[in-house]
Amino acid sequence: MEESMLAGGMSCLRVGAGRPLVFLPGLTAHHRPPRGMDRRFQRGQCALLAHGREVWWLNRRPGLSAGTPMADIAGDYATALRDRFGAPVDVVGVSTGGSVALQLAADYPELVRRLVIVSAAYRLGPFGRTCQRETAAALRAGRARRASAAMMAIIGAHATTRRVMRVVGWLLGPVFLGRGDTDLLATVEAEDVLDLHDRLADITVPTLVVGGGRDACYGRELLERTGELIPHGATLIYPGKGHMGVQNRRVARDILAFLSPS
């Protein structure tokens, strides 16, 4: 897996070979190049899609200031994609990366060939927003374990598993989310106020929204509504799956099949 930097110092990892596919990850503890366990996790996500494709994992720009809107974050991606590829590319955004990808496609449709949104919608659901606000407040207060517990709760597909994931998050503490990097907090703030409901009609590229039927962060209704409101949108729901339950080989095959038309 090759590591490099793109415009604005955005961290980039590459895996595979073939037509480029740009991968926008979910929340990360910081916007520096990933290391150790985090790097292995990110590589694993990309490897699922690196079948006849060159996957470009591209994180947000480092040095975000408080109050940076999602439109500016998407603008950073637009600059990087325009400078590196010079032609429309396939984009896959996961969770918070999916929120950014929706903004990118609404503002810069000329840069996106086909779009896949995984476990994300035009705004956060009530539980997702509550957990992310709790996470941000805990990080600002220096309570890394509480922050990690709140964020991990989003992953659970059922009330019981959400409680279990809170405990796991508490045990992981700063290993999962660090201790409150300013880039993480700025990204959480940007997503907290994001509502692209009225911009979905501006997304003119073929789009697939993929999610779990028991996604706690956004909820099935928001996932389906997002796909419905995009002119060339479709939704693929996996019953019984939670927020992270759709990141597997089966889903990767479905994504690649959607992206395969020339």
Image (cartoon, helix red, strand yellow):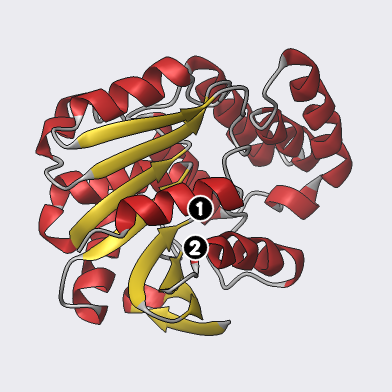
Q: Amino acid at mark 1?
A: Ala
Quarter of the image containing the N terminus? Answer: bottom right
- Residue 68 appears in the figure: no
- Viewport quadrant of the C terminus: bottom left
* x, y percent for residue 115: 28, 50
Residue name at image x 51 percent, y 24 percent: 129
Q: Is residue 249 above or below residue 90?
A: above
Element at badge 2?
A: helix
Q: Secondary structure at mark 1?
A: helix
- Residue 243, visible in the rendered structure: yes
Q: Is the residue marked by circle 1 packed among few (<14), some (14-19), or many (20+) residues within 10 Å? A: some
**Direction from residue 20 to residue 230 in the image, left or right:** left
Q: CA distance from mark 2 to mark 1?
A: 6 Å
Q: Is residue 189 above or below residue 158?
A: below
Give the labeled residue for mark 2: 49
Q: Are marks 2 and 1 in contact (CB under 8 Å)?
A: yes
Which residue is drawn at the image coordinates 19% and 32% (left, top)? Answer: 230
Q: Image quadrant of residue 196?
A: top left
> Residue 164, position in %: x, y?
84, 26
All told, the count of numbered labels is 2
Q: Residue at x 62, y 55 (%)?
A: 29
Mark linked to residue 252: 1
Disc 2 marks a residue whose amino acid type is Leu
Q: Position of residue 154 (x, y in %)?
A: 64, 29
Q: Residues within 10 Å of mark 2 (few under 14, many from 20)?
A: many
Rendering coords of residue 112 (x, y %): 20, 58
Name which residue lies at 67% across and 61% down: 41
Depth order, front residue of 70/113: 113
